Amino acid sequence: MDVIALPAPTASLPPPQVCEQARISRDPRFDGLFFVAVTSTGIYCRPVCPAPAAQSRNVKYFGHAAACEAAGFRPCLRCRPELSPAEGAWRRGDAAVARALKLIDEGALAEQPLSALAERVGLGERQLRRLFVERLGAPPIGVHGTRRLLFAKQLLTETRLPITEVALAAGFGSLRRFNAAFAEAYRMAPRDLRRRPNEPPDQGGGDALVLRLGYRPPYDLSAMLDFLRGRALPGVEHVDEHSYTRAIGPAHAGGPADAPGWLRVSAWPSDKHGRQHALKLELHGTAPSRLLDITNRLRRMFDLDADPNAIGAALSVDPRLRALVARQPGLRLPSGWDGFEISVRAILGQQVSVAAARTLAARVAQRYGHALPQPFGPGLTHLFPTPAELADADLAPLGLTRARADTVRTVARALLDGRVDFRAERTLDDFVARWVALPGIGPWTAHYIAMRALGHPDAFPADDLVLQKALPEDGVRLSAKALGARAEAWRPWRAYGVIHIWRSSMAAPTPIRAAAPTAVAAKRKRAKQAA
């Protein structure tokens, strides 16, 4: 592998003394924020690597795995850099690098040149390359290549997928190209990695394919599941105290690669080394070509790449939020699986309770969603309808007002003709402006969709009644303008402030219990006991 002479990235790295202390102490809060390259071995590691710490004189720090590989280092087979969370702040918000990284995640460089990526984020090709090298330590094509290879490395280590399917899942057009790229980067063939003494793949039983989704602690999975459980659509998704389960499309099966499947997300079990900072993804009936998209969606949905320390520090400038962050430092921004589904639910939730909106959305899913050939998992029977299925749907019999039914159809048609979309290159202002131009969509709905569909960290529904009442502690309701002015200090993490306030305003979640026996069942039980 040729070594590319690149300047060491500095903007995204913590100070050297912080990196050194985090490396020595194996602090998981810094996992993915930097990587440790050891010059004496040619290997790069996560800061949490369990191997004996290298001597400081043999260590270099990089802000991105691609920068390590561009400098000629290979990933550690013990700590497995592919499991680390992504770059946190560099992958969030409206900065050009953040938007370009999201597009690379979506495969923008798989079939298009760098010039097309640069145009989508409003920069010249040369300028975009310079920004990547300055801030991440590697050019965009290097980030793209490292991302594909590390995902392939995870699949080779954790699954029993044939190598041909691993190559397809990682975005390589052919097995030959994959073998060549893997051998050049890691100095071994893909099959040789499987011959090494890695931990045995955990298939979860049956046809399940199991992957780890890493995060930086602290992470409050219980709060995340509480939020999702209160909004879960019967038949489409199911949330209990320990896991999230849903059916996933595409809806119209045209062959094995297009058949629906289902997934479950839960905490990764602790092992002999203690708690694992990862979620467990179990996939059933999923084509390899969809694996990368699915993992990207779930990383956004469960907000796994957030840096809670940076977010907490920014929000703590507000005394009200400081106490909330201290109480729940691991609270994350819950997103959604599908943008159109979230937008429909946002419309149905205008000026009604969460429970009422959930009931209406469930009716829409049952009436117009795609019924599965057979139920998946715990009562998963339908996929949520697509924009084409709701563009001309008669929604009045489902209990929707005429205005909301019109808005749902308008949004469906606008997505089909391109007036609105969920494209990663959109800035928050551009996204909101496009959505509020539609009849029936106001600023609250547009910002709510940005929060839940895009996972945008700075979305802020200033017209939200709960925020206006709950933020001040003197009982005085703030106006939308006053609320927005106060939240300026929270940027670029205003959406996290919203989640903290919403969470603090919620009633304690009701424990999930078995249903109480009916009067008839109770009578039969008493008769049986008497007999």
Image (cartoon, helix red, strand yellow):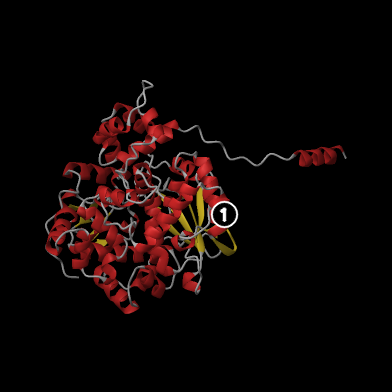
Position of residue 304 relative to residue 525, above or below, is below
Q: Residue furthest right?
A: 531
Give the percent coordinates (x, y) of residue 85: 32, 52
Q: Is residue 249 left or right of residue 297?
A: right
Residue ID for mark 1: 235
Give the percent coordinates (x, y) of residue 292: 38, 63
- State the residue in front, 51 or 61: 61
Position of residue 329 relative to residue 63, above or below, is above
Q: Residue furthest front?
A: 402
Tag count: 1
Give the percent coordinates (x, y) of residue 418: 33, 61
Where, by quadrant of the figure, is residue 350 drawn? top left
- State the residue in front, 317 or 160: 317
Q: Residue at x 14, y 62 (%)?
A: 124
Q: Secondary structure at mark 1?
A: loop
Where, by quadrant of the figure, is residue 199 drawn? bottom left
Quarter of the picture containing the N terminus is bottom left
Q: Residue at x 46, y 43 (%)?
A: 349
Q: Residue at x 86, y 37 (%)?
A: 530
Residue 203 visible? The answer is no
Where, by quadrant of the figure, is residue 499 drawn? top left
Q: Residue furthest bottom?
A: 176
Three-letter amino acid code of the residue under disc 1: Gly
